[in-house]
Amino acid sequence: MYIGVVKPNQMPVQNFINYLLLEKKYSPNTVVAYQNDIEAFQSFLITDFSDAEVSKANYSQIRSWIVQLVDSNISNRTINRKLSSLNSYYKFLLKTESINSNPLAKHKALKVSKKIQIPFSEVEINNVLDSISTNTFEGLRDKLIVELFYSTGMRRIELVQLQLQDVDLSQGQVKVLGKRNKERFIPLLPSVMLTFQAYVSARLNLETIKDQHVLFLTKKGTKVYEMLIYRVITSYFDTISTKVKKSPHILRHSFATHLLSNGADLNAVKELLGHSSLAATQVYTHNSVAELKKAYKKSHPRTLS
């Protein structure tokens, strides 16, 4: 998978793209992001140094690119992501003995402010669910989307890719295909299964269904897409919540935070979220601690005197 014509000096990049897709099993979207970052640096080298060989670049040239990105008001977080893509490429070249040293080996990431994502409260989520009219196909679909996000913690792309056969009502679970094609099974609440049955019944009444096996469809019978899911979530939560960020990921965040706040085991939450390491899951414990502090200040005898 490489967009455009592959030129001779792009062959190492092509090999890297194939490595990410076939060996690392990264998603196509992730691979395109890596490719775009490498090509952006390549364009910079051509413009500023008349050289298109990313593999031969030195740290001084990379520093010049960083300065240009900073001057262009690109955020430190985005710059770090671009450099991470470049660093992965150089590590691949080292592994395949295409270069002798990694010019980014001693590079330190730019400082970024911590992104504090505030989860929705249980009240906010319940209010949204109560506000969704289930008299239409789209209403039933949207309610199931919100319920699945909050009760399973799945990612947006995972929800979009769900097939009808992935939902097993007899076992009370849903099969989710996560990052790197890793499958996991997540329990379904009885209330979610009821909404699922109502949605599937309404789905049968669509005039045409083009994507027969896909769970979530538009009213035209075609597969939903990620931006549509984003709009569904923001449209409902905009009327209920005053939080700045209202996205599907905040529902995933809420799922994890509420489970941990209610005593769920960290390892169990890790498995449910499809994280490869505990470090990623531990991000959500900070919110649980914040809630504990809030409850402490509100209820501790010394704070009441």
Image (tube, rainbow, N blue to C red):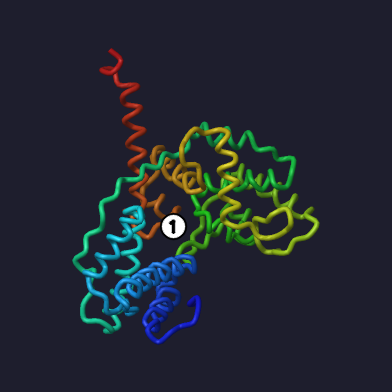
Left or right for 26, reference 299:
right
Q: Residue at x 34, y 32 (%)?
A: 292
Q: Residue furthest top?
A: 305
Left or right for 139, reference 265:
right
Q: Which amino acid does label 1 sit on?
A: Gly
Q: Residue at x 47, y 67 (%)?
A: 27
Q: Quadrant of the C terminus?
A: top left
Q: Which of 101 and 95 is in front in this view?
A: 101
Per the image, the residue denoted by label 1 is 274
Q: Which of 140 and 40 is in front in this view?
A: 40
Counting from the top left corner in percent of width and height, residue 90 is at 29, 74
Counting from the top left corner in percent of width and height, residue 190 is at 60, 44
Q: Which residue is drawn at 73% across and 64% down?
A: 210
Left or right for 185, reference 262:
right
Q: Which residue is drawn at 45% across and 74% down?
A: 21
Q: In this view, does 123 lie above or below 35?
A: above
Q: Classify 10 Å Cα crowding around label 1: few (below 14), some (14-19), many (20 and above).
A: many
Element class at badge 1: loop
**Which quadrant of the structure image shows residue 284?**
top left
Q: Which residue lies furthest to the bottom in this view?
A: 8
Q: Is residue 95 above or below residue 106?
A: below
Q: Nearer the viewer, residue 104 or 247?
A: 104
Q: Residue furthest left?
A: 106
